[in-house]
């Protein structure tokens, strides 16, 4: 099944940066134009410059929102703003946050996962993808030749073997990275480098399929990039970096795993068809109609979801 490997992570040099909360950003697909501008203003080293660079009116083939991140990455590495870990590691990540007034902690491991075509059912998607965001991530990958944000995938930790193994690693040393973001979320990351432990983690997941929870476009873009690179060099080693993609793996039963549904706006359906659909849905679901005129309608919808 899934093949995972440690890797040499690239991260900020806190001695130069100071407050890490000023330089982190969300994945590209939830960065709105106003948030993008705010992140640019927040710090000259904010990661948005790599993850989701601004598109400018004067962009050219040689200078655009994909080439600039590549130049920025090279510059930051040269300046020591970013540094590369010397020893390959599996990174243990604890993410603390509050939702609906309740505190949660989600634990994941950040690893490299071998890319597999969908037909092999090793890495399993659950939704379709769109051409535009795939092309966007592929263009960035071509220039940057690096993964900027991990795909979130889920696995089943049978017997809680992996959870027990990870819990034993936490007190061994201080976190490599520890910060609280501007919105109050906490992040602690440990580097697991001991070869025996790394092998145990890999073996515990060797028979497990992985289910993509977030990052379908990034995964398909990584597959497309892999195909391009293999086509250019059929003799390339199976260990080449382009054969792998960065993922955060989380156990299905992790108490901090909260995946909220998107709200779908249905258009172009006649009232008669909609009424018939509603009747069929009532056989399987509880349906409650909320007036859109109420300002708190989305909060009400979230509250209902938390009760299920």
Image (cartoon, rainbow, N blue to C red):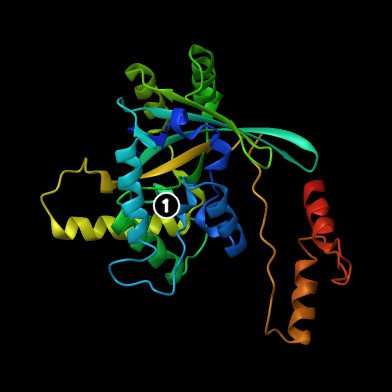
Foreground: 21 or 30? 21
Which one is in front, 7 or 16? 16
Which residue lies at the image location 39% right of the left edge and 43% below the top edge? 246
User: Which residue does the image show at 49% across and 65% down from the upper left?
Assistant: 128
Question: Is 250 above or below relative to 216?
Answer: above
Residue found at the very far top of the displayed protein = 172
The residue under label 1 is 50
Farthest-out residue, left:
235
Q: Would residue 117 be found to the left or right of residue 272 on screen? A: left
Q: Total number of numbered labels?
A: 1
Locate residue 227, reporting x and y percent: 25, 59
Look at 78% across and 36% down and name the residue there: 102
Q: Is residue 117 visible?
A: no
Q: Is residue 53 left or right of residue 115?
A: right
Q: Quadrant of residue 76?
A: top left
Q: Is residue 53 above or below residue 208?
A: below
Q: Residues within 10 Å of mark 1 (few under 14, many from 20)?
A: many
Q: Nearer the viewer, residue 243 or 136?
A: 136
Q: Position of residue 209 (x, y in %)?
A: 44, 42
Q: Position of residue 159 (x, y in %)?
A: 54, 25
Label 1 residue SS: helix
**Is residue 250 at all visible to an observer of this figure?**
yes
Residues 29 and 106: in front is: 29
Whole-percent x, y for residue 170 in the image: 53, 18
Does residue 20 lie above or below 196 as drawn? below
What's the residue at 67%, 51% (across, down)?
260
Where's the N terminus, which quadrant?
Answer: top left
């Amino acid at each position: 099944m899934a093949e995972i490997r440690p890797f040499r992570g690239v991260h900020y040099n806190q001695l130069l940066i100071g407050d890490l909360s000023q330089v982190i950003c969300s994945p590209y697909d939830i960065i709105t134009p106003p948030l993008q501008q705010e992140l640019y203003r927040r710090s000259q080293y904010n990661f948005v410059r790599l993850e989701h660079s601004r598109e400018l009116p004067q962009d050219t083939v040689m200078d655009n929102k994909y080439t600039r991140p590549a130049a920025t990455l090279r510059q930051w590495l040269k300046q020591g703003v970013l540094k590369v870990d010397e020893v390959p590691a599996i990174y243990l990540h604890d993410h603390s946050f509050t939702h609906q007034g309740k505190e949660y902690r989600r634990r994941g491991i950040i690893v490299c996962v071998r890319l597999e075509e969908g037909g092999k059912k090793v890495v399993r998607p659950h939704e379709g993808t769109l051409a535009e965001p795939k092309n966007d991530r592929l263009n960035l990958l071509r220039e940057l030749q690096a993964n900027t944000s991990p795909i979130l995938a889920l696995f089943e930790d049978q017997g809680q073997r992996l959870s027990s193994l990870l819990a034993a690693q936490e007190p061994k040393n201080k976190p490599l990275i520890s910060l609280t973001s501007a919105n109050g979320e906490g992040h602690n990351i440990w580097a697991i480098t001991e070869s025996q432990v790394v092998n145990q983690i890999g073996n515990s997941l060797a028979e497990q399929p992985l289910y993509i929870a977030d990052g379908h476009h990034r995964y398909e873009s990584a597959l497309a990039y892999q195909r391009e690179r293999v086509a250019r060099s059929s003799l390339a080693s199976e260990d080449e970096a382009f054969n792998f993609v960065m993922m955060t793996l989380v156990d299905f039963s992790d108490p901090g795993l909260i995946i909220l549904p998107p709200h779908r706006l249905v258009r172009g359906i006649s009232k008669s068809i909609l009424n018939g659909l509603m009747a069929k849905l009532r056989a399987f679901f509880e349906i409650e109609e909320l007036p859109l005129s109420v300002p708190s309608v989305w909060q009400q919808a979230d509250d209902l979801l938390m009760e299920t």
